Image (cartoon, rainbow, N blue to C red):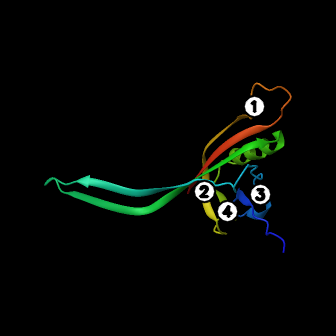
Amino acid sequence: MACPTKNVYLGPVGGGIDAEILPKVKWVGGAPDFPTTIDPQTEEATMSDRSRRLAFFDSVEDWGLGWGYLTYDQLKDLRDLIALRQILKYRNDFVDNTEYDVYISSFSSGPTFPKMRGYPYYRADMTLRQA
């Protein structure tokens, strides 16, 4: 029995997310784990009698994505997603098939081995925030 293919998708809203597969993560050991952070949206106010009032809102999730061995073309594809400057759809089939509206809140990249000439691979880290 063949193992089902799982991918991570990030693409424009309404643009067919299945066409925008992110580069495969290359790893050693167990399967990759993209960290998820939940930011509970809570506001706290102190009343004149010094009592506190709390307001709870829907939580916002952040996803950290990282790659260690990207080709230049793969790095360019990630940069092209940033250049769209819009809300995107995100789905991680390793977890489930839920699609989220997200935006890219941070991105950094650089050579995998900066002091090694002739080694054309790059690392990149991206944070997605729920829109």
Q: Which residue is mark 2?
A: 102
Q: Which residue is mark 4?
A: 91
Classify mark 2: helix, strand or loop.
strand
Q: Position of residue 5 (x, y in %)?
A: 79, 66
3D distance between C-alphas at marks 1 and 4: 30 Å
Q: Residue at x 19, y 54 (%)?
A: 47
Q: Residue at x 61, y 61 (%)?
A: 101
3D distance between C-alphas at marks 2 and 4: 10 Å
Query: Which labelled disc corresponds to residue 57?
Result: none
**Going from the N terminus, do you reach mark 1 or mark 3 first?**
3
Contact check, label 2 and label 3, Cβ < 8 Å: no
Q: Position of residue 113 (x, y in %)?
A: 75, 31
Residue 106 shown left or right of residue 111 in the figure: left
Mark 1: which amino acid? Phe
Classify mark 4: helix, strand or loop.
strand
Q: Which residue is mark 1?
A: 113
Q: Residue at x 70, y 41 (%)?
A: 124
Query: Which labelled disc corresponds to residue 21?
Result: 3
Q: Is residue 16 visible?
A: no
87, 90: nearer the viewer: 90
3D distance between C-alphas at marks 2 and 3: 15 Å
Q: Is residue 121 visible?
A: yes
Specify few, some or many for label 3: CA neighbours under 10 Å numbering under 14, 14-19, or 20 or more: some
Mark 4: which amino acid? Arg
**Going from the N terminus, do you reach mark 2 or mark 1 first?**
2
